[in-house]
Image (tube, rainbow, N blue to C red):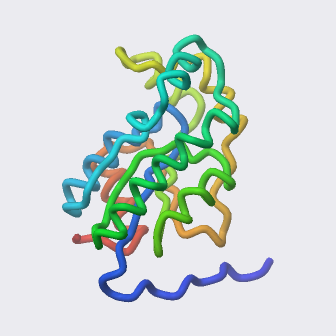
Amino acid sequence: MSPTPQRPPTPPGVPTGLVVMGVSGAGKTTVARLLSDRLGWAFAEADDFHPRTNIEKMRAGTPLTDADRGPWLRAIAAWLAARADAGENAIVTCSALKRAYRDVLRDAGPRVRFVHLHGDHDTLARRIGGRSGHFMPPALLDSQLADLEPLGPEEDGVVVDIGATPEEVAEEALRRLGRSGA
């Protein structure tokens, strides 16, 4: 097995876009808000970038296609790029299930990193079933898990298990990103 390629360090002052990713129920919004508060970075919720047609499809239990996700991903990338152009660090939630989706997001700025929130099926299903007012039905969990492509060793990101409290998950993400104590 070849060693993991090391990315060159980002020069000081280069903005970072942090994508908190994972399937529905992983706790992306909760953890991303904690990270945003801790770091003082701009925050956006990817669900707010979905066109109405995507939301209606998901609400009806229909999985989104790559074509459905394209405009959504480009809108998220545009938000990240605008933050980077303004010299701001930013955090956004996004399922970012496939490498190709992450590639779209990676093009948004000089440094886009990922925090993949990972959990087992039962935990995720329990979380989705226990929330109210969200358009994502529990029935779509299996399609999301089927689409999920884990971060590759050359991708700038970390994987964090969701079994702890949100605060502990956020702290572990910071530690793994090299930002503990931030």
In which quadrant of the rendered view does residue 23 lie? top right
Q: Is residue 78 above or below residue 65?
A: below
Q: Horizontal and vertical percent for residue 96?
A: 57, 47
Left or right: 107 in relation to 43: right
Q: Give whichever of 148, 121 is nearer the camera.
A: 148
Left or right: 11 in relation to 100: left
Q: Residue at x 65, y 18 (%)?
A: 62
Name the quadrant of the N terminus: bottom right
Q: Give whichever of 58, 155 is nearer the camera.
A: 58
Left or right: 44 in relation to 61: left
Name the quadrant of the C terminus: bottom left
Q: Horizontal and vertical percent for residue 72?
A: 53, 40
Q: Horizontal and vertical percent for residue 93?
A: 42, 46
Q: Horizontal and vertical percent for residue 129?
A: 46, 16
Question: Which residue is situated farthest in the right direction here?
Answer: 1
Q: Residue at x 39, y 50 (%)?
A: 92
Q: Give whichever of 82, 132 is nearer the camera.
A: 82
In which quadrant of the rendered view does residue 132 lie? top left
Q: Residue at x 60, y 14 (%)?
A: 61
Question: Which residue is situated farthest in the top direction here?
Answer: 60
Q: Residue at x 33, y 49 (%)?
A: 32
